[in-house]
């Protein structure tokens, strides 16, 4: 059965796990947490593996993580001590990594490999919510450091056959990501950006959809929403892998004064 592809928000740092006693997240983050917690059950079947591209890993060329048992990379600062002891000990997916590498290379892109880097918080924070049993193997894919939207859409297209092989392709980022701008004064511009982005992402014509999303920086308030676009580029991979399938907004929420959306293709 063909799985959809997803672009999901991963929140802010370890936002879902701030209580040292395992209590609920701050109410601001609870709707996003509930969305992530229901992801696997929302799929037509349970994935045999996950291929995830995070906004927190960039390399000069797209790179696949081939490790069998990656550690975690606590790449956030200023959070409570217990959040640097969080665990999500899912197995890696070396076979999936090799398959992904072959597909991307066949599309004409050079691909690097990495076996030692830990999974960053764009991986383990949302996946700890979505797959609390840590029982689905995962391979991580990097962004390409030039952040070329069309290249990332093409890389996603190359990965599309994985959807028929029981693999869930996930882009993990944030639809709005400007850490210097938070609070009610942001909301009107964030809402306008979110409405324009959602209109582009859900365009029913797949070719026009890809063109509009690749030109994301022409949308209203684009550089306000993303002074640097690394948290938006995982969307390009998910969109490319989604191919001609319908797209819709899978989640609409608000955090830090931002409108935050998730998208599903297929």
Image: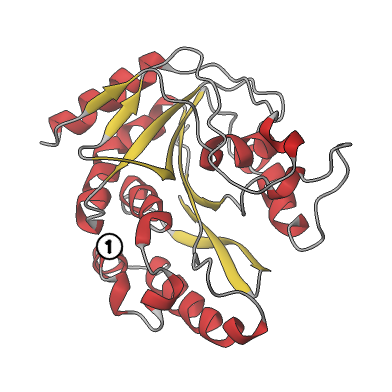
**What percent of the width, then of the height, locates residue 9?**
56, 54
**What percent of the width, then of the height, locates residue 87?**
67, 26
* 77 sits to left or right of 111: right
Q: Is residue 180 above or below residue 145?
A: below
Q: Nearer the viewer, residue 204 or 146?
A: 146
Q: Which residue is at 70% across, 30% downward?
A: 86
Numbered disc total:
1
Q: Nearer the viewer, residue 26 or 247?
A: 26
Q: Which residue is at 44% across, 60% downward?
A: 247
Q: Nearer the viewer, residue 176 or 181?
A: 181
Q: Which residue is at 65% across, 49% downward?
A: 78
Q: Is residue 113 above or below residue 254?
A: above
Q: Disc 1 marks which residue?
A: 210
Q: Which residue is at 37% across, 75% downward?
A: 223
Q: Is residue 76 above or below residue 166?
A: below
**What percent of the width, then of the height, locates residue 264?**
50, 53
Q: Secondary structure at mark 1?
A: helix
Q: Quadrant of residue 224?
A: bottom left
- Mark 1 packing: few (<14 Cα in 10 Å), some, or many (20+)? many
**What percent of the width, then of the height, locates residue 198?**
46, 71
Q: Quadrant of residue 125?
A: top right
Q: How is the image coloured?
A: secondary structure
Q: Nearer the viewer, residue 118 or 43?
A: 118
Residue placed furthest toward the left: 108
């Amino acid at each position: 059965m063909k799985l959809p592809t997803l672009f999901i928000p991963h929140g802010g740092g370890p936002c879902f796990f701030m209580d040292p006693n395992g209590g609920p997240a701050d109410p601001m983050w609870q709707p996003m947490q509930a969305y992530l917690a229901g992801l696997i059950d929302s799929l037509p079947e349970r994935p045999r593996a996950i291929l995830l591209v995070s906004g927190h890993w960039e390399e000069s060329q797209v790179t696949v993580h081939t490790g069998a048992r990656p550690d975690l990379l606590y790449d956030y600062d200023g959070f409570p001590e217990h959040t640097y002891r969080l665990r999500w000990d899912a197995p890696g997916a070396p076979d999936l990594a090799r398959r992904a590498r072959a597909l991307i290379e066949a599309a004409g892109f050079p691909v690097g490999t990495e076996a030692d880097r830990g999974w960053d918080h764009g991986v383990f924070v949302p996946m700890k919510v979505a797959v609390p049993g840590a029982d689905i193997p995962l391979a991580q894919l990097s962004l390409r450091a030039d952040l070329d939207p069309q290249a990332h859409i093409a890389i996603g297209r190359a990965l599309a056959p994985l959807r028929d092989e029981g693999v869930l392709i996930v882009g993990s980022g944030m639809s709005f990501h400007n850490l210097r701008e938070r609070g009610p004064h942001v909301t009107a511009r964030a809402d306008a950006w979110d409405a324009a982005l959602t209109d582009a992402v859900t365009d029913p014509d797949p070719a026009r959809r890809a063109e509009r999303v690749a030109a994301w920086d022409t949308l209203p308030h684009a550089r306000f929403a993303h002074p640097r676009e690394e948290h938006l580029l995982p969307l390009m991979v998910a969109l490319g892998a989604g191919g001609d399938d319908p797209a819709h907004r899978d989640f609409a929420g608000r955090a830090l004064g931002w409108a935050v959306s998730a998208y599903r293709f297929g």
